[in-house]
Image (spheres, helix red, strand yellow):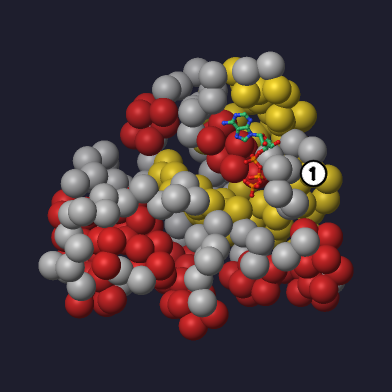
Amino acid sequence: MRDALPPALHVRDLEAWYGESHVLHGMTLRVEQGEVVTLVGRNGAGKTTTLRAIMGMLEKVKGAIDHEGKDLLALRSNQIARRGIGYCPEERGIFASLSVEENLMLPVNVSADGMEVAELYTLFPNLAERRHGQANKLSGGEQQMLAIARILRTGATLLLLDEPTEGLAPAIVQQIARMFRLLRERAYTILLVEQNVRFASKLADRHYVVEHGKVIDMLSSDDLAIRRSHIETYLGV
Ligand code: ATP
């Protein structure tokens, strides 16, 4: 019955500015409920800005952003978070001086669906082992898991993730891949910025190629895998 549901996210003709600088030029994309979709594109193409615009973090935007059929554009960031949308920026947003457990206890549980800490430890055994350790002593991969665990704790069901594998060693990327599979099984909807083409082609359903602030192409994971070296050259990665 998936067809009967409104899309988890529908962005249409989105324009966005930083001051006078016009950065998004008609960004249009759609993510169905339970889908994992990536934004790929060169540096400065507007991927992060798209996520920030969805979260209501930009002052000047025009166009339409709907979440499960309801308008987001008129809402403030905290109201958008309360609708069940979680954002993990590239810099991850964890509290470095606090322990893992303190980081997990801090986010406000915005809905009854927020995951309990015990359940998060089942999902992320590495975090359970390090629960009393300081967050800044975690490896890059564990910090990424903690950042995502904090979002799951809020009860968010649509996750916007900015380059979760950036700077991580291949073995750690495998751990992040495992985490994505678990989130997929639990029907989370995920829109992620991802430049690791191999990782993206294995985990996501579809891929939007972003250039100059808009989508210029959409690829299936098979297309992405087949054209991997061409796309890596295009992305400069
Ligand atoms: P990257 O991976 O390099 O972040 P991106 O596709 O995510 O690439 P954005 O960060 O969305 O790109 O940037 C889009 C454009 O907006 C770029 O030209 C960038 O220089 C500009 N930009 C980004 N943040 C700001 C800001 N805070 N103020 C002004 N311009 C900005």
* Residue visible at 17% across and 68% down in the picture: 133
Q: Quadrant of residue 48?
A: top right
Q: Name the one closer to the observer, 7 or 18.
A: 18
Residue reaching furthest bottom? 171
Above or below, 152 against 228 in this view is: above
182 relative to 221 in the view: left or right: left
Tell me the quadrant of the picture where the C terminus can be found: bottom right
Q: Name the one closer to the observer, 10 or 77.
A: 77
* Residue visible at 29% across and 46% down in the picture: 154
Residue 34 visible to the viewer: no
* Residue visible at 41% across and 70% down in the picture: 141
* Residue visible at 50% across and 71% down in the picture: 168
Expressed as whole percent of the image width and height from the top left, the position of residue 44 reads 70, 43
Disc 1 beta carbon < 8 A from ligand 1?
Answer: no
116 relative to 170 in the view: left or right: left
42 relative to 142 in the view: left or right: right
Tell me the quadrant of the picture where the N terminus can be found: bottom right
Above or below, 26 against 127 in this view is: above
Q: Secondary structure at mark 1?
A: strand
Residue 111 visible to the viewer: yes
Above or below, 54 against 164 in this view is: above
Count of labels in the image: 1
Kind of residue indicated by mark 1: Glu
Expressed as whole percent of the image width and height from the top left, the position of residue 221 reads 72, 68
Expressed as whole percent of the image width and height from the top left, the position of residue 218 reads 79, 53
Ligand 1 rendered quadrant = top right
Above or below, 144 against 157 in this view is: below
Q: Name the one closer to the observer, 111 or 76.
A: 76
53 relative to 219 in the view: left or right: left
Expressed as whole percent of the image width and height from the top left, the position of residue 125 reads 27, 77
Mark 1 lies on residue: 211
